[in-house]
Amino acid sequence: MDKNEHNCESRRIDKVYLLCDCNNFFASCEKLFRPDLKTRPVAVLSNNDGIVVSRSYETKSLGIPMGSPVFKIQKEINKYKIATFSSNFSLYLDISNRVMSTLESFCNDIEIYSVDEAFLIFHNITKEEALNLAFRAKNAVATLVGIQIGVGVAKTKTLAKLANHHAKQHRNETHGVFSVLEDAQRQRILLENPIGEIWGIGKKNEEHLTEDGYRTALDLSKADPDLMQKRYSIVLSRTIKELNDIDCIASVISDDVQGQILWSRTFKERITDFDDLLEAISNYVADASSKLRQIDRYAKKITIFIRTSFFGNKPKYANDATLCLDYPCRDTRVFLAVAKELLKVIYKKDFEYMKAGVVLYDLVEERTFQADLFSKAPEESELIKSDRLMDTVDLINSQSKNSIYFGAQNKLTKERKFNGPDHLSPRYTSSFDELPKVY
């Protein structure tokens, strides 16, 4: 290599993104404490064990798609001895925290995008340094946590996403790391990836772009950003620039407080009775309220919804109801009372309900409010008592799960009647009672 080539290779880049994404995260977490599952197909199911939400590579190789209803693939589960697990979010969140803590040891500038994805942002580094950091981060997570990750290296977040996808799709060739800092590699992944694989391109936009003649990411990269902004949106215009190494997507971490809390489940068995439906919704209200207090917020509005299955020949019905509270609230008792009244409004007999849920939204950080002429403002002392009571309930339940519950929840029958996680693994890392046992 001559001197000019060496200088070119060592040229420093203003900003480089490393997108670190855990491979088949939920399934990988389940395998972590089960060495007997190392080469066995694994599928993680939704809360009510209804559909597949995570698949190991072995399961993917069997042709089982994401979102498959369990009843449709039961033959494959039996034939190939697929190990199935109910979603164990306590375990997944704890492993996620360990992964992110490990990644943070490599970079001060990190944007956590989801439970299993994070962007590491480096400034003024060379291509060699970026690749070295990518492999070091990958190996550290594998060694210290036990989770395999893929790493995409690029000058923009959109390209880092595509590079990460390529790294994981061709892991034998890439060893889990792929860089598009060189233009030849950037052109390669743009040509190989269809429009729908680009980060931020939704199904509707994909259809419209395909109709306009854009088939691959390379096709889209050649479009005029200004014209596409007029025809589509500024978001698509930015995506086109990102595909051309122009960094223009702001932080993926929102400065706004969490906008809403949604708690919803599909019932294991269809429900027709009002009291059973109220019991289910009451449990979702209690869980959502607890989450609201965990993030130290108050909600000003509550919505509940119910619906039957969209499929089959039986009568179909769906409805929801919303109430704006007189003051920002975090008291489970208030939400339970409101939910009951809302359910009375939308409930109809003779329907087989298969799903219900609650949404707490219009969240605020403080309980400041202006009372009107038609509502009585609660006494400050009563609000303080309410907060103390709820904090005490949360504290006790954090030490011993479900020690305290509200009568409307009918907690003794809740798990059996509604959620039914039949394949739940232990919370290996977050519960002393469920620590791994060595014999």
Image (tube, rainbow, N blue to C red):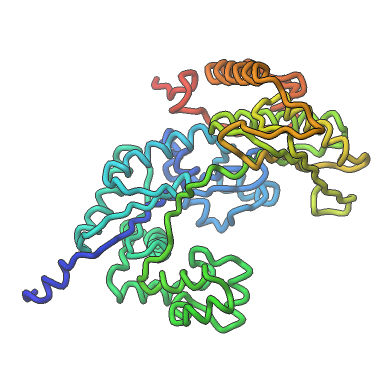
Residue 33: percent from the left, percent from the top?
Answer: 42, 33
- Residue 274, visible in the rendered structure: yes
Instruction: Identify the image quadrant of residue 106.
Output: top left
Name of the residue lying farthest toward the bottom:
213
Residue at 91 percent across and 41 percent down: it is 348
Name of the residue lying farthest toward the right:
350
Q: Is residue 385 above or below residue 286?
A: above
Quadrant where the N terminus sits is bottom left
Say left or right for 83 vs 106: right
Which residue is at the front of the view, 45 or 1? 1
Name of the residue lying farthest toward the front:
373
- Residue 421, visible in the rendered structure: no
Residue at 28 percent across and 43 percent down: it is 140
Residue at 53 percent across and 33 percent down: it is 295
Q: Is residue 280 above or below residue 244?
A: above
Instruction: Identify the image quadrant of residue 285.
Output: top right
Residue 127: percent from the left, percent from the top?
Answer: 22, 64
Quadrant where the C terminus sits is top left
